[in-house]
Image (spheres, rainbow, N blue to C red):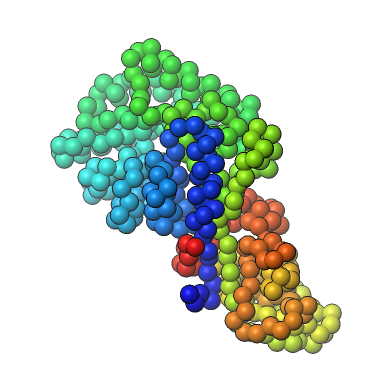
Amino acid sequence: MSRPITWVEISKKAFKQNLEQFKNVLSGTKIMLVVKSNAYGHGMLPMAKLAEKFRINWLGVVNLEEARKLREGGIKTPILVLSYYQLNKEEINFAIKNDIRLVVYSEEQLKILDNLSKREKQKLKVHLKIDTGLSRLGILVDKADSFILKSVKKYKNLIFEGIFSHFAASEENLMFSQFQLDRFNELIQGLERKNVSFPLKHFACSAASLVLPNSRFNLVRLGIAAYGLWPSSKTKRIVLSKYPNFTLHPILSMYTKIVQLKRIPANSFVGYGCTYKTRKPTIIAVLPVGYWEGYDRGFSRKGKVIIKDKFCPVLGRVCMNMIIVDVSKVKNLKIGDRAIIIGKSESKKISVDDLAKMIGTINYEIVTRINPLIPRFYV
């Protein structure tokens, strides 16, 4: 099948292998695949369909708009909106009618959701979000007990299906993570002594699900690791010490094609700002990938691509839609030949982690910022 000029490939096999490993380690704990932000750049709807095919229990999205796209795309799996949504009748009614669970963390949300559920004569399932130390969205844990006891009694048109929190540093600070977990457990145990319990309790993200087994409860939220990327190098070390055979398989590769080849003389400036000058006659290839496509400007004079199993350095600045690479050492090139932006050839590899390290960021950002308009192929 002919490929467009720039494209992304997603390995279904690698994705399934990652999920199967988690299922083995988690021993029956339900799994929510987080598909927010275009499934971390991998394509939200197609990844949700694969999750359904591979029998994942839940899907997590950032907002109601993403949930709508999944339902309109035919997804039947339970969906939880993890972060925010607009409190208007149209949006909330869509959630009620399409069995989309909503996060709650304020009195205002509860009032509006309860009233609209009453009007629709259909109860809405909600999950309470508790702030145990991230200081982001959520009910402050110190105020959560009284808030929850009052809410459960007052809002009869809502089903309080779940309660959850989010780690601040499970990838790197296990002491603080345990502190957060202890606060969450104290809240839950206190509520249970007052006869308030929740069918679903969840806290663990990718890292915590592996390094803090007591954070799993009966549902874990898998994000970056399901896509084959380690949350951090520390997480990887800890996990491999516990599970030596646990292997994550990156599922995303990114490619483009050469659009022009030419030989330029010594002392030629390359790219915007005249930041690079050739020292000798150089053969350059122009590739149609730039910061619009998600190839960060930070890769200027740092990045490299693979062409015919050779590393080819990026010369000059990354443009909005193009980069220029040195292909002087590559033989028999022609217009249309493939360049690997992320992925591997016979003996060379450019990983997402390599790229993140190169510009001082995290692997999450590299994949999430790949432009969603670039075609994805699930192979």
Query: What residue is at 48 percent from the left and 23 percent from the top?
Result: 184
Q: Quadrant of residue 302?
A: bottom right
Task: Please say if 253 is above or below 33.
Answer: below
Query: What residue is at 24 percent from the left and 27 percent from the top?
Result: 155
Query: What residue is at 29 percent from the left and 23 percent from the top?
Result: 152
Q: Quadrant of residue 153?
A: top left
**Observer able to see residue 368:** no
From the top left corner, tell me how far across and down residue 149 is, in percent: 33, 19
Task: Please say if 85 is above or below 25.
Answer: below
From the top left corner, tell me how far across and down residue 177 is, in percent: 58, 29
Query: What residue is at 21 percent from the left and 31 percent from the top?
Result: 157
Nearer the observer, 124 or 22: 22
Indicate left or right for 336 with 82 as reference: right
Indicate left or right for 95 with 362 as reference: left
From the top left corner, tell me how far across and down residue 246 is, in percent: 62, 41
Outermost residue to the right? 279
Q: Quadrant of residue 240?
A: top right
Nearer the observer, 121 or 48: 48
Indicate left or right for 147 with 119 as reference: right
